[in-house]
Image (cartoon, rainbow, N blue to C red):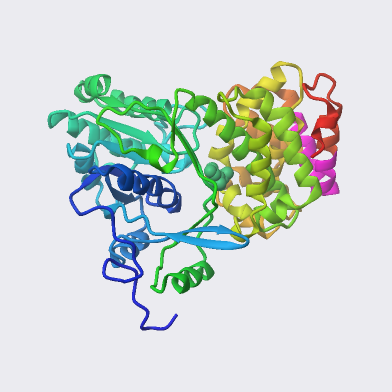
């Protein structure tokens, strides 16, 4: 790309015309990361093209000034690169009317939520961004940021910003609004509402009362299930996109062709015609979420941890390994499938075989370290409920136990065990606490017991499941002594011979 190449922007011939003008925002979005830009923004572009409306998006990056500066330098335009091994297709959504950094201007987040022109607040702040305790599932009152937000400082947590914004909105007349979580949390709408209500209830005296009454009457929190694999952008992608576009784009977003959005249709102040982009409005969002969070995300975590331990830097490299493919099939069929109620009309075999195709998309370069990051909060969503269901019906969920063993082996290796570079690249808020436990653990079982039973890493109920904890411990020891392949093969054969297993062992074959 030569220095004369123009930067993507409204006046660049290469740019698609933006679909919105400043001042036409109806949506405030918290979490201006890649996922939002390749998912909700694309659906909103389709809605605006089909149906118009004042549904421009004001994007709030939680901390990153770099993304906000880059977007402003490009008149808030960027491209989404839909990638397969044989093709790269570009689109420029053009739906943002403004962007700013929430950590720098928290009061602006509050006043935007109070602005009657804004009728929906959407969120992609990751599983980590909801300030709840994984052990109790309630607002984390031990978190220093939550405590400061409750004490009345400019709010820094997403829940604090939502609660303070809704408080101002209630005081300013209380125009109806909806808050739409787009993160991989089960019952994400209900969960977000619970946390906002807990925040308001914790305020001293009757400070939160007006806002709580406003929530009862004019605020809805629809749940939604979002799905699109969006890896991190690389310098190589930037160069490729700029070449194809004929204009420099510093913040393109790579994404797979597959995309899905299932939403509960409960919007207090109206909504864009997102169905124009293929969104499904349904009363069965809970089922979609459960299917996706377990079959896709739960299995994704297994692939990421076992892959990293096998030396695979990317998900397609990992799933190409026979042992990991068998483990992925076994965990889906024997442990996740029995735990879900399928949405009407969904063919689970077709859904699963599509998942294997999506994971095999080698052009995406989706890293095992990206999927393995933040396991302490992600696994809390993906693992305990299906594991407990299996345990309560008398089955050991060997492959879920192996996933947890893979996670602990990556993040908290026992002394003398090196999980490799891909595990080292995973970041996790619990890493330090887990490393301290591992440093003095006498065995895999000791480590598993401390993490699950003492730290309550996966909630309270599973903390008392001794047989499960022992199985996790055995796998940690096997990984350390005989290698990850041996642990995979033990888990897959144990899963096949589980006497009360709901499925025929033959079905585990691809
Ligand atoms: C992944 C998800 O990083 C992860 O934990 O499992 O981000 C996954 O790629 C998306 O949920 C796909 O929709």
Q: x%, y% of residue 463?
A: 63, 25
Q: Is residue 239 above or below residue 90?
A: below
Q: Report whether 329 appears left or right of 455.
A: right
Q: x%, y% of residue 98?
A: 25, 54
In the image, residue 490 lies in the stretch drawn in magenta = no
Q: Report whether 438 appears left or right of 27.
A: right
Span of residues in magenta: 469-489
In the image, residue 486 lies in the stretch drawn in magenta = yes
Residue closest to the eye, 276 or 57: 276
Q: x%, y% of residue 191?
A: 42, 27
**Residue shown at 61% from the left, 33% from the top:** 294
**Residue shown at 22% from the left, 39% from the top:** 118
Q: Is residue 427 above or below residue 15?
A: above
The quadrant the N terminus occupies is bottom left
Residue closest to the eye, 301 or 141: 301
- Figure quadrant, ligand 1: top right
Name the quadrant containing residue 192.
top left
Residue closest to the eye, 322 or 276: 276
Q: Residue furthest front?
A: 50
Residue closest to the eye, 215 or 423: 215
Q: x%, y% of residue 436?
A: 62, 45
The quadrant the C terminus occupies is top right
**Residue shown at 49% from the left, 72% from the top:** 239
Query: Can residue 122 be seen from the camera position used here?
Result: yes
């Amino acid at each position: 790309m030569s220095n004369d190449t123009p930067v993507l922007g409204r006046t660049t011939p290469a740019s698609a015309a933006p679909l919105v003008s400043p001042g036409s925002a109806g949506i405030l979005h918290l979490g201006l990361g890649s996922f939002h830009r390749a998912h909700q923004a694309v659906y909103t572009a389709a809605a605006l093209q089909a149906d118009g409306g004042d549904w421009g998006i004001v994007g709030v990056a939680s901390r990153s000034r770099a993304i906000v500066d880059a977007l402003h330098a490009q008149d808030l335009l960027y491209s989404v690169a839909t990638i397969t091994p044989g093709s790269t297709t570009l689109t420029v959504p053009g739906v943002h009317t403004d962007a700013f950094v929430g950590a720098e201007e928290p009061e602006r987040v509050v006043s935007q939520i109070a602005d009657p022109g804004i009728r929906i607040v959407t969120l992609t702040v990751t599983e980590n961004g909801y300030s709840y305790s994984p052990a109790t599932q309630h607002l984390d009152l031990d978190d220093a940021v939550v405590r400061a937000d409750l004490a009345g400082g400019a709010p820094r947590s997403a829940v604090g910003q939502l609660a303070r914004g809704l408080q101002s909105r209630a005081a300013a007349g209380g125009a109806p609004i909806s808050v739409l979580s787009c993160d991989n949390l089960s019952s994400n709408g209900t969960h977000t509402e619970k946390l906002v209500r807990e925040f308001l209830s914790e305020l001293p005296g009757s400070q939160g009362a007006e806002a709580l009454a406003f929530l009862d009457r004019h605020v809805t929190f629809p749940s939604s299930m979002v799905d699109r694999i969006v890896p991190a952008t690389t310098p190589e992608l930037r160069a490729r996109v700029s070449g194809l576009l004929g204009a420099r784009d510093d913040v393109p977003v790579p994404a797979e062709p597959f995309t899905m959005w299932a939403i509960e249709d409960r919007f207090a102040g109206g909504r864009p015609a997102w169905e124009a982009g293929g969104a499904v409005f349904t009363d069965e969002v809970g089922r979609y979420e459960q299917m996706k969070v377990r079959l896709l995300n739960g299995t994704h975590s297994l692939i990421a941890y076992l892959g990293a331990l096998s030396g695979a830097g990317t998900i397609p490299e990992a799933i190409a390994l026979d042992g990991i493919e068998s483990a992925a099939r076994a965990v889906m069929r024997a442990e996740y499938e029995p735990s879900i109620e399928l949405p009407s009309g969904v063919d689970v075999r077709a859904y699963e075989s599509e998942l294997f195709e999506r994971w095999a998309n080698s052009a995406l370069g989706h890293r095992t370290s990206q999927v393995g990051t933040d396991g302490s909060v992600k696994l809390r969503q993906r693992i305990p409920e299906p594991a407990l269901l299996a345990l309560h019906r008398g089955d050991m969920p060997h492959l879920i136990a192996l996933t947890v063993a893979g996670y602990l082996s990556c993040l908290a290796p026992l002394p003398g065990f090196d999980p490799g570079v891909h595990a080292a690249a995973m970041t996790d808020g619990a890493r330090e606490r887990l490393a301290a436990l591992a440093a003095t653990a006498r065995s895999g079982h000791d480590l598993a017991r401390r993490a699950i039973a003492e730290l309550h890493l996966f909630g309270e109920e599973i903390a008392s499941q001794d047989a499960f904890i022992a199985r996790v411990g055995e796998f940690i020891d096997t990984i350390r002594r005989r290698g990850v392949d041996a642990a995979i093969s033990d888990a897959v054969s144990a899963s096949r011979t589980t006497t009360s297993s709901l499925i025929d062992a033959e079905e585990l074959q691809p």
